[in-house]
Amino acid sequence: MDIPIDDYVAGAAVATDLVTTSPTVRESTGEALPTPEALAAFLAAHDLRPAAALPPTSENVFQVQLLRREVRGIMETETADQAVAGGRVLLRRAGLAPVLRRAAEGKWQWHVPTAPGASLADELAAFISLGLLGVVRTLGHERFRACAAPGCRGVFADTSRAGRRRYCMPELCGNRLNVAKHRARRQAGSVIA
């Protein structure tokens, strides 16, 4: 895998989405990466193509589930120094020295290649680490947050321009909260009438 350094947002999005696949976050639906097919769909949804280009195996699923715990740990660190230290550990799993390459449009771009023969989880770790390190460098450690939805145990990296994201999965957690507020307003209105 060849990871562009300047696109930390993609790595941070994968980190957030990986953490939200956990049964810790998805208590009602359970594990979102239970099979090699689910892992393949996750990678495809993020347009990630590991260097080996082989279909994921059960061992890959297990290793990515372990990686998910490490990523969550980095997002829950108390300080930027702790987050950076965790990001470095992930990057060292497969990341090699940065290289400068000319992109298709002729512009020079920094990339971090991954080690030949690196496992799928190690390549994913390197990709995610660059995203998380980019968040700390560009936006600050305070952009790692816990989900604001009551009862949700999700965490996320807020890469939004305004920095006002509140939910790990806005389409699920945010919508669930909005529906609950709407029902409460309707119920309060019918009690008064």
Image (cartoon, rainbow, N blue to C red):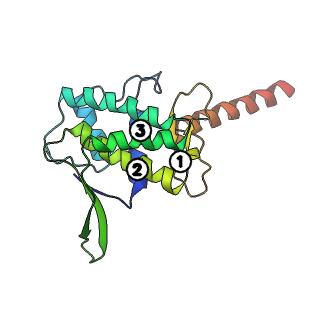
Q: Is residue 3 above or below residue 125?
A: below
Mark-to-mark CA distance, 2 and 1: 11 Å
- Asked which secondary structure carries label 3, the reply is helix
- Relative to 116, 61 lies left or right: right
Q: Is residue 124 above or below residue 6?
A: above
Taking depth in this image into account, of 30 and 74 the one nearest to the observer is 74
* Residue found at the far right of this picture: 192
**Marks 1, 3: nearer the viewer:** 3
- Quadrant housing residue 38: top left
The residue where tag 2 is placed is: 131
The residue where tag 1 is placed is: 158
At a point 43% along the width and 54% down the height, the residue shown is 9
Taking depth in this image into account, of 180 and 7 the one nearest to the observer is 7
- Asked which secondary structure carries label 2, the reply is helix
Choose the circle earlier in sequence order: 2 or 1: 2
Residue 70's disc number: none
Residue 143 percent coordinates (x, y): 56, 46
Identity, as a three-letter code, of the amino acid under mark 3: Gly
Mark-to-mark CA distance, 1 and 3: 18 Å
At a point 26% along the width and 71% down the height, the residue shown is 103
Residue 118 percent coordinates (x, y): 18, 41
Taking depth in this image into account, of 57 and 101 the one nearest to the observer is 101
Identity, as a three-letter code, of the amino acid under mark 2: Gly
At a point 13% along the width and 43% down the height, the residue shown is 117
- Relative to 161, 112 lies left or right: left
The residue where tag 3 is placed is: 86
